[in-house]
Image (cartoon, rainbow, N blue to C red):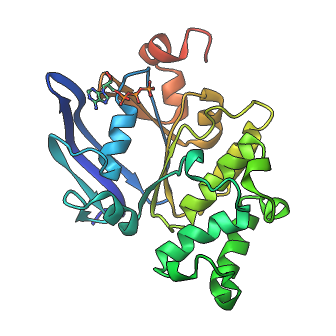
Amino acid sequence: MTSGLAVHGLSKNFGGLQVARNLTLSLPNGARTALIGPNGAGKTTFANLLTGVLKPTSGTILLNGKSVGKMSESERVRAGIAKTFQITNLFRDLTVRENIRLPILERERRTNKVFCHSDGIPELECEIFQLLEDLALTPLADKPVRGLAYGQQRLVELALTLALKPKVLILDEPAAGVPSTESHLIVQAIKRLPADLSVLIIEHDMQLVFEVANRIIVLVNGAILLDGTPQEVISNREVRELYLGADHG
Ligand SMILES: Nc1ncnc2c1ncn2[C@@H]1O[C@H](COP(=O)(O)OP(=O)(O)OP(=O)(O)O)[C@@H](O)[C@H]1O
């Protein structure tokens, strides 16, 4: 049995347009994999196939050896495949701590406690404390989300997703919109993610990719052009010409 996510022969057509072409790859536990490629290469489509937003035309997806093909989006989240929340899903008037509490209560099916402080559930408060610590959000814990810098809000998104205790975490453009002065917050947070988590990072910011990924998959026209180490990607002429530009490497 393969530990982590295993994708075999995954294809997706939109009418006559083939957006995922016979993709076969594995995302083992502990992997830090970046998925890169030009606009329209099919990266978001691939993420949507993993999370169940889209159904594949053909192919299989196994999580720890078990097919997730028939699972709904929410069943896949419960099974351990999670994509980062979007900032638009944060409750802007609630504090960081209150925002993080919500998915934990949801996960524990204790949403009847949403309007109480869960001081009565010490193990959950402990978990919130730990997430705040892991993401360096403790100093902001009791501030409303609306007052935070954009990069900090993206960390809260990440905390909410981690609260679901995923086995596979999909980060869809974690640095998008984050000013360069705050992007180090995202890099540090990714570096501090649990070691056994399989992380798939879809990102255009190549500096971030090279800082956090130990494997890079290059997708072009829905197919894998190259699946290798950052060094292999930098030194591949076709990748450089297609995507990175001649000045890299
Ligand atoms: N629901 C849809 N119906 C039809 N075509 C779609 C649909 N979703 C995506 N596409 C097409 O599939 C192709 C791949 O899109 P996708 O968003 O997956 O690419 P991407 O690599 O994530 O691009 P970007 O980097 O710009 O976000 C594009 O040509 C897009 O227009």
Q: Compared with residue 212, is residue 60 higher up or lower down, i.e. above or below?
A: below
Q: Residue furthest right?
A: 139
Point out the image quarter for the N terminus.
Answer: bottom left
- Residue 48 at x, y percent in the picture: 34, 43
Picture residue at 74% right of the left edge, 31% below the top:
179
Quadrant where the image shows the C terminus: top right
User: Closer to the camera, 106 or 190?
Assistant: 106
Which residue is painted at 64% across and 86% down in the image? 123
Coordinates of residue 39 in the picture (x, y in percent): 43, 21
Q: Position of residue 11 (x, y in %)?
A: 20, 37
- Residue at left 55%, top 73%? 104
Q: Nearer the viewer, residue 74 or 191?
A: 74
Q: Quadrant of ligand 1?
A: top left
Q: Position of residue 19 (x, y in %)?
A: 26, 28
Q: In the figure, 90 relative to 74: above or below?
A: above
Residue 17 is left or right of residue 63, and the answer is: left
